[in-house]
Image: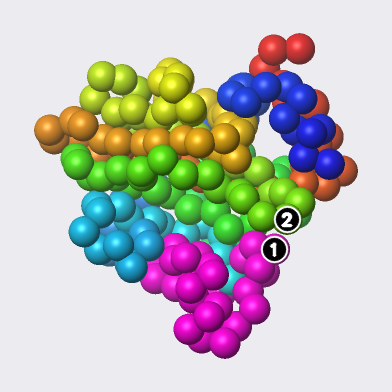
Amino acid sequence: MIDKITQYGDFYQLNAHFKVNKLLKELEPFKDKWAKYNPRKPQILRDGLCVINDKGKCGPGPALDSLLQWNTENGTFLKEKDFNIPTELYKSSSELQRVMEPMLDWSVRSHFLRLPPGGYFSPHRDHVYYDQQSFRIIWPLQNCNPPSFRFMLEDTTLNFDHGHCYVINTTKAHTLFNCSPSNDSIMLVVNALVCEDSIRFVQDNLYIR
Ligand SMILES: [Fe+2]
């Protein structure tokens, strides 16, 4: 079913726009709740702040870790679809609720991602084995454009309007790095289940149609 999402392109915009200043302001009371993203690689500067996860509470845990390694070490069988409980951050942010409420039934593991200067993701794919059952919806919010930041999809640097909503085919190789000397990069990443309702949402909200 993933072809229903990828048929529109590898990088395309949806009508689901955040007021960036308002949203970032609503994050401020949670400034102590950011946690290391993938703590198994502590040398890489990356933090996450959970919007939807397995326990409905901000902080460290499997939603910000390698799921495979977490399950192996803890004897758990957590799957992407088990990360479906909005956190106190979601419940406190009218801006998150305004934009994400129509998506909540099929949105799973979702978080703000912060890359401080020097933070990066080396080339990788978000899906490799099995049928792909989720896809990425991303809102770049702060310092996500060249030349101070690069989101590369294969060999192409993506250019964003901050606050706007994008579907990105992260099954293709992608690379992120913040080469700003001083500014953090911040984006919101939603994992959306591939289902009739999410496909219809994408169709109804295509920016170009
Ligand atoms: Fe990725």
Q: Amino acid at mark 2?
A: Tyr
Amino acid type at circle 1 is Lys
Q: Which portion, as a residue range, is magenta?
A: 55-84
SS category of the residue bearing label 1: helix
Label 2: how many residues lie within 10 Å, few (<14), some (14-19) or many (20+)?
Answer: few
Q: Which mark is residue 81?
A: 1
Q: Position of residue 2 (x, y in %)?
A: 77, 40
For label 2, the SS is: loop
Q: Taking 68 as reference, is 114 left or right? A: left
Q: Is residue 123 left or right of residue 201?
A: left
How packed is label 1: few (under 14 Cα within 10 Å), some, or many (20 or more)? some
- Asked if residue 81 lies left or right of residue 18, the reply is right
| Residue projecting furthest to the front | 129
Q: Position of residue 117 (x, y in %)?
A: 19, 40
Which quadrant of the figure has residue 84? bottom right
Which of the labelled discs sits on residue 130, or is there none? Answer: 2
The N terminus appears in which quarter of the rendering?
top right
**Can the viewer see residue 31?**
yes
x and y percentages locating residue 204 in the rendered image: 79, 26
Q: CA distance from mark 1 to mark 2?
A: 15 Å
Residue at 72% x, 49% y: name it: 132
